[in-house]
Amino acid sequence: MYENILVPSDGSRGADRAFEQALDLADTYDAQLHLLHVIDVSGDAGEFRPVTVVEELRERGEELTGDLAERAADVGVEARSDVIRGLPHRTILDYVDDHDVDLVVMGTHGRTGLQRYVLGSVAEKVVRLSDAPVLTVRASEEEVEE
């Protein structure tokens, strides 16, 4: 049913919960996991961050996706890791198209009301614009408050 499952991760607990769901699905369907961390260039200083900051963010992203890949390998699931600089939702959508992704599994922060509209939602944009199905895994209330 699924051959390529994408798990975008920002290192949050909600993203970790999504990873666990994706890992179970990949194990069940013998699918490859694609672990993606996006270095967010949105915001005022996105394109003007010093090279050292961008490299530090890349290293953190590589460490995060590397740890997830090791967890996948521990249960016999093949995983590939990518760290890409860009606008999060656009980078995820481009990745889906470029890698024949069958399913995107991503965490949501569970924000509501004004906070949701002010901060925006990467998951919401991906759900609305993705050609592939998107499974969202909501963070618990305790995880949102942390």
Image: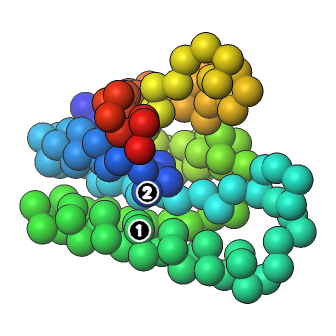
Residue 127 at x, y percent in the picture: 55, 24
Nearer to us in this view, 50 or 129 = 50
Instruction: Name the residue located 62 percent from the left edge and 30 percent from the top edge.
Output: 121
Q: Secondary structure at mark 1?
A: helix
- Residue type indicated by callout 1: Leu
The residue furthest top is 113
- Binning the other alpha carbons within 10 Å of mark 2 as few (below 14), some (14 to 19) or many (20 upward) gives some
Say above or below: 21 vs 138.
below
Horizontal side, residue 87 vs residue 111: left or right: right
Dividing the picture into quadrants, the one containing residue 102 is: top left
Are the residues tagged 1 and 2 within 8 Å (C-beta)? Answer: yes
Q: How is the image coloured?
A: rainbow
Measured as percent of width and height from the top left, residue 61 is found at: 51, 69
- Compared across the picture, whether 37 is left or right of 140 comes to right
- Residue 130 occupies quadrant: top right
Question: Which residue is pictured at 82% across the width and 79% down the height?
Answer: 50
**Identity of the residue drawn at 68% across and 29% down:** 120
* Secondary structure type for disc 2: loop
Query: Which disc, if any, is residue 11?
Result: 2
Q: Amino acid at mark 2?
A: Gly
Q: Quadrant of the N terminus?
A: top left
Residue 25 in sight here:
yes
Q: Residues within 10 Å of mark 1 (few under 14, many from 20)?
A: some
Left or right, residue 17 beside residue 54: left
Dividing the picture into quadrants, the one containing residue 34 is bottom left
Q: Could you tell me how far apart the alpha carbons at marks 1 and 2 are, in whole angstroms?
A: 7 Å
Q: Which residue is mark 1?
A: 64
Relative height, residue 62 to residue 38 (above, below):
below
